[in-house]
């Protein structure tokens, strides 16, 4: 495979419901998801663990998350490390697990993600630490504000419309209504999205992903090991990552996410695939505009046509390339550190034919794109059905 | 805003001091140790132009706690006449009058307060050029 | 020749009409406007304070003076609304404008005449040969108690004066000061609004000090009202300065250009300094200007200026006061005004 490394497989997954989980602590949530993944995979031990979480410190005052979770999962002295890349923490955690297996260092690794956002912390301030504190946040920008600026520039340059943004929200809520783990399980109408409370012009409340608690975990091992276990598995055919300037004003373009296109190019090269080979994708729709720009920068649609694609149903289940069949961050929820891993889970479920009403027919290749901040980091994985 | 962190950014926030790469001429704002364009490590201090135009903007309706009493307010990415881009509020205007391409000038304003007894924190904001 | 080498003013864009304040508290707008001769006043934006106002005014003064900021040896801001009780406003100003660090700095307070006291000290340091240039500023975002007479006039704005001995645009010929312990208006530490003694603020305070300072200045200089083209007085409203000026022998025409309170309100430490700036914007070489400030508590500073040829070279290098006063105004209603002036109790 890549440079003589071993081929890597995902053999099990587990997640909690996403939402306001008042009765569950961060530890409860992570342990619940991890136990489900371990049971689902049929392994009786793990060699190592990676936990993606954006900020245990700011949300619940807890750092040293790797150690905390290894302790509470009852697996100590197994090594455990917390991985952070803002909203791409989950994807980055999965990537570390991939490395550890591909290099032959370990046989079975748990890659998990968790975030507990409803314990009373100032969520806006905590999330803002993913942006440039001194030169963006200091001057009064918010996360919706950063993506709103991208939206306005995209609308100015490519004539993307407000309705097109709303179509993304409508589609994702429709998908989420079929996902038992989603935070929001009822569909929304175009009118509801267009008339929702204004947050940062032009983005309204229903253009924005929510504040959520949740955990997700997958078990990663070598393809050889998966075959030995005789378990249904999916193969990781690409793992790529890229970075870009922390501040939106430092980017080359205000309407393109270079970290996405750079990581995507690497991922396509690694796997020998083209965008048109991808059957479906989970992308980082922290805001509706993000899905539109990302689908362009992943090469699914020509630059500037992401909005029209959503409007014309190309990204719906049954469409040309279903995007966010899980409901996306918008409807499924966005417990920051868990999101990247939850995307892998959706890929795993789809590729093993377990997605019920949301099933993409004949899905062979799925792509997961996880992104940090306003596009300062991006992690992409491509998985193949076996 | 903790004093040492605030104090360190004063030359940038008050005087718009930036670092110009001696090798390739790229201006970094704020100044930094390595030029992102040519990787050189030698810079000279320059002051940014105070005039520019709006590249994109948003109107914040739901703001962070510190700014919640100021909503709605405009935040924009501004390109100054020397090519440097920065993020700043556009103040003293009808929020609906800002457009992509609007010409602006940078002024010295109070950006935020550290609560009732903490520091007053100052910096740059933009005003539309139709103002004196 | 020692005097002003650069001057600049700054007024916020926001205004509130006196009518709205009157209606808010059940007073008769017409009676108020007639009685006080005030029509509207300036209101500082949420992101403005005495420091930001001083920085913009001083920036304009530097533009007119055309000197290297590092040559300024002292910076004094006079105000009764310094943002910090302890930490001089000018420490922030010098870093904003690239003045110093080899510079004297302090905050001055003397109610509405803190600005002119700062100007006097700046002038004196240059005259004494201590330094080549010194900057004196009068600026305020004064606060009037809700429903009180002073709410109609308390406004925001300021002016900055760089004193020097080269390329002087207005030479200072004479100065004086007249001070006594007169409790007409004060604010105790930790109190949010000032208090005043009603009608006692008139004859025994404002008029007594302006008149005595003015009379002494006329005697000291050997000049009489007809020697002057312009006269500027502290303007707590529209009426008082006209009366005070008349008592000292000046005509309405002489006071007209510097009489800006009906549209600006009372910018406290910025009041007569800003009236002076309005005059400098139009004065011709050779014109003489008579100025007397007033600060409650109480005292008055007198100045006699003579404009030089240099004024024509610098006048257009920065915005004119009248432009700032008359154009680009944004009118507020009382609710917005109360929010901007932080008169609404918040949950903090």
Image (tube, rainbow, N blue to C red):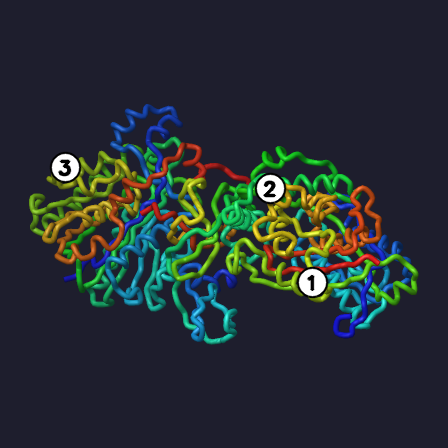
Q: From what the image shows, is residue C187 above or below residue A80? A: above
Separation (CA) of disc 3 from disc 1? 83 Å
Q: Nearer the viewer, residue A253 or C273?
A: A253
10 Å crowding of disc 2: few (<14), some (14-19), many (20+): many
Q: Nearer the viewer, residue A337 or A321?
A: A321
The chain carrying label 2 is A
Residue at 75%, 52% (x, y): give it.
Answer: A342
Residue A62 visible somewhere in the drawing: no
Which quarter of the rendered picture does the N terminus of chain A lie within? bottom right
Residue behind mark 2:
A164
Residue A80: name its quadrant: bottom right
Separation (CA) of disc 3 from disc 2? 65 Å
To the question of a shared chain for discs 3 and 2, the answer is: no
The chain carrying label 1 is A
The chain carrying label 3 is C
Residue A189, x across and y down, in percent: 66, 34
Q: Earlier in the sequence, mark 1 or mark 2?
A: 2
Which quarter of the rendered picture does the C terminus of chain A lie within? bottom right
Disc nearest the viewer among 1 and 2: 1
Separation (CA) of disc 1 from disc 2? 28 Å
Residue behind mark 1:
A268
Disc nearest the viewer among 3 and 2: 2
To the question of a shared chain for discs 1 and 2, the answer is: yes
Residue behind mark 3:
C252
Q: Nearer the viewer, residue C329 or A69?
A: C329
């Amino acid at each position: 495979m890549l440079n003589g490394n071993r081929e890597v497989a995902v053999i099990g997954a587990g997640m909690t419901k996403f939402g306001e989980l008042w009765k569950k602590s961060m530890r409860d949530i992570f342990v619940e998801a991890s136990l489900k993944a371990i049971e689902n995979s049929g392994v009786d031990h793990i060699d190592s663990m990676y936990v993606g979480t954006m900020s245990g410190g700011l949300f619940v005052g807890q750092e040293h998350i790797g150690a905390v979770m290894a302790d509470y999962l009852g697996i100590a002295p197994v090594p455990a490390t917390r991985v952070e890349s803002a909203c791409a923490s989950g994807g980055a955690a999965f990537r570390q697990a991939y490395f550890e297996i591909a290099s032959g260092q370990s046989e079975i690794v748990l890659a998990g993600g968790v975030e507990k956002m409803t314990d009373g912390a100032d969520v806006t301030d905590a999330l803002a630490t993913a942006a440039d504190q001194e030169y963006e946040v200091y001057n009064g920008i918010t996360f919706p504000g950063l993506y709103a600026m991208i939206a306005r520039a995209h609308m100015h340059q490519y004539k993307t419309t407000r309705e097109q943004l709303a179509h993304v929200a409508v589609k994702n809520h429709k998908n989420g209504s079929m996902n038992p783990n989603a935070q929001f399980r009822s569909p929304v109408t175009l009118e509801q999205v267009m008339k929702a409370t204004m947050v940062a012009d032009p983005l309204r409340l229903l253009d924005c992903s929510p504040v959520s608690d949740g955990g997700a975990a997958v078990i990663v091992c070598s393809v050889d090991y998966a075959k030995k276990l005789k378990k249904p598995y999916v193969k990781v055919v690409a793992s790529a990552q890229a970075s870009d300037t922390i501040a939106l004003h430092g980017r080359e373009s205000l309407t393109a996410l270079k970290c996405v296109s750079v990581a995507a190019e690497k991922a396509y090269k690694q796997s020998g695939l083209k965008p048109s080979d991808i059957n479906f994708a989970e992308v980082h729709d922290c805001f509706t505009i993000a899905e539109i720009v990302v689908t362009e920068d992943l090469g699914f649609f020509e630059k500037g046509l992401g909005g029209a694609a959503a409007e014309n149903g190309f990204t719906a289940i049954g469409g040309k390339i279903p995007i966010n069949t899980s409901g996306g961050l918008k409807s499924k929820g966005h417990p920051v550190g868990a999101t990247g891993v939850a995307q892998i889970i959706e890929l795993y479920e789809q590729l093993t034919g377990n997605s019920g009403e949301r099933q993409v027919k004949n899905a062979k290749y799925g792509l997961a794109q996880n992104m940090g901040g306003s596009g300062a980091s991006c992690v992409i994985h491509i998985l193949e059905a076996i | 805003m903790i004093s040492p962190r605030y104090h360190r950014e004063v030359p940038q926030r008050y005087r718009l001091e930036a670092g110009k790469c001696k090798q390739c001429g790229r201006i970094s704002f704020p100044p930094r140790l390595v030029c992102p364009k040519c990787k050189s490590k030698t810079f000279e201090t320059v002051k940014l132009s105070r005039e520019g135009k709006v590249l994109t903007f948003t109107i914040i309706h739901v703001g962070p706690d510190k700014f919640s009493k100021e909503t709605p307010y405009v935040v924009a990415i501004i390109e100054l006449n020397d090519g440097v881009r920065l993020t700043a509020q556009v103040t003293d205007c009808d929020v609906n009058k800002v457009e992509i391409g609007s010409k602006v000038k940078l002024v010295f304003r109070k950006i935020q307060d550290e609560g009732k007894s903490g520091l007053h924190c100052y910096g740059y904001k933009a005003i539309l050029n139709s103002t004196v | 020749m020692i005097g002003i080498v650069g001057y600049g003013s700054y007024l916020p864009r926001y205004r509130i009409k006196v009518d709205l304040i009157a209606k808010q508290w059940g007073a008769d707008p017409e009676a108020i406007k007639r009685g006080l001769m005030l029509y509207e006043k300036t209101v500082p934006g949420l992101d403005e304070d005495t420091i930001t106002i001083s920085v913009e005014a001083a920036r304009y003064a530097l533009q007119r003076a055309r000197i290297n900021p590092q040559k300024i040896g002292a910076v004094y801001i006079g105000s009764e609304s310094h943002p910090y009780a302890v930490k001089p406003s000018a420490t922030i100003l010098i870093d904003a404008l690239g003045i110093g660090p080899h510079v004297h700095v302090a905050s001055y307070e003397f109610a509405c005449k803190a600005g002119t006291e700062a100007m006097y000290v700046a002038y004196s340091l240059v005259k004494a040969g201590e330094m080549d240039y010194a900057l004196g500023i009068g600026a305020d975002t004064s606060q009037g108690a809700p429903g009180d007479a002073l709410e109609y006039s308390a406004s925001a704005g300021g002016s900055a004066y760089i004193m020097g001995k080269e390329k002087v645009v207005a030479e200072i010929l004479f100065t004086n000061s007249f001070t006594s312990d007169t409790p007409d208006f004060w604010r105790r530490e930790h109190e949010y609004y000032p208090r005043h003694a009603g009608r006692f603020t008139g004859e025994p305070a404002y008029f007594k000090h302006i008149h005595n300072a003015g009379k002494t200045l006329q005697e000291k200089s050997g000049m009489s009202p007809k020697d002057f083209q312009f006269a500027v007085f502290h303007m707590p409203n529209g009426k008082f300065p006209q009366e005070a000026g008349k008592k000292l022998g000046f005509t309405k025409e002489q006071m007209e250009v510097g009489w800006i309170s009906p549209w600006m309100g009372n910018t406290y430490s910025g009041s007569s300094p800003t009236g002076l700036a309005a005059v400098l914007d139009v004065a011709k070489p050779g014109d003489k200007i008579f100025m007397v400030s007033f600060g409650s508590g109480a005292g008055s500073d007198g100045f006699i200026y003579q404009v030089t040829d240099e004024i024509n070279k610098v006048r257009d290098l920065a915005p004119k006061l009248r432009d700032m006063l008359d154009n680009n105004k944004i009118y507020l209603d009382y609710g917005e005004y109360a929010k901007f002036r932080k008169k609404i109790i918040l949950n903090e």
